[in-house]
Amino acid sequence: AFYFFLSSEKTDKPAIRRNYLLWAALFAALAVFAKQTAIVLPLLFAAALYWRKRGRELPLAVALYLLVIAGGLLCLYIAGEWSYFFANIIGGVSNGFRFSWFRSVIFEDFYLEFGLLLVPVFFFLLWKMKQEQNGLLQLIMVLVTGLFLLENILVLKHGSNIGYFTEW
């Protein structure tokens, strides 16, 4: 998904740009069925499109994204797997958000062990993002930074683990 999204930034041809964006939407939707936290991808892509003044390209990509999600859910329903998918999502969200979980499992077991290295890297990326003149590299840094922030929010969910950080 990131590859196609970033490829859409590298071309000036509207048709090719649109096709890359549609491929990014397709793979972002498919990623949700591999790992539900991939739901952050369209948020990041939409923010990047608006930041890059490409918001008018968003409706078609959103339509394809929603169509693929609906198609995937329909396939799960027809195959009889809907209840497992639904239980995974609703069960996970039902666990609630707990700062005590984050402190004891994520912060103490991950951040204090080796994850603290991510904090200076995060601030380095912010600093580098301000200095970078290449728009594509700047966009990559924005996407990585945004994904890191969103994953830190998602990991507040009780039962989460540090695997959320391996996705970015």
Image (spheres, helix red, strand yellow):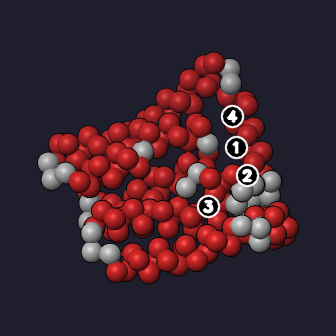
Image location of residue 132, percent across then percent down: 32, 75
- CB under 8 Å between callouts 2 and 1? yes
Name the residue carrying label 4. Answer: 85
Residue positioned 26% across, 55% down in the render: 9
- CB under 8 Å between callouts 4 and 1? yes
Is 135 or 39 nearer to us in this picture?
135
| Crowd tier of the residue under label 2, counting other residues whose Cα lies within 10 Å: few below 14, some 14–19, many 20 or above | few
Task: Specify the amino acid type for callout 2.
Answer: Val
Name the residue carrying label 1. Answer: 89
For mark 3, give the secondary structure: helix
For mark 2, give the secondary structure: helix
Q: How many marks?
A: 4
Which quadrant would residue 48 be assigned to in this image? bottom left
Q: CA distance from mark 2 to mark 4?
A: 12 Å
Q: CA distance from mark 1 to mark 3?
A: 16 Å
Name the residue carrying label 3. Answer: 151
Residue depth check, mark 1 versus mark 3: number of the one nearer the observer: 3
Task: Specify the amino acid type for callout 1.
Answer: Ile
Task: Specify the amino acid type for callout 4.
Answer: Phe
Task: Specify the amino acid type for callout 3.
Answer: Glu
| Crowd tier of the residue under label 3, counting other residues whose Cα lies within 10 Å: few below 14, some 14–19, many 20 or above | many
Name the residue carrying label 2. Answer: 93
In the rendered view, would you say 113 is above or below 21? Answer: below
- CB under 8 Å between callouts 3 and 4? no
- Report if residue 125 is visible in the image: yes
Image location of residue 74, percent across then percent down: 55, 26
Residue positioned 70% across, 43% down in the render: 89
Residue positioned 72% across, 56% down in the render: 162
Earlier in the chain: of badge 2 and badge 4, it is: 4
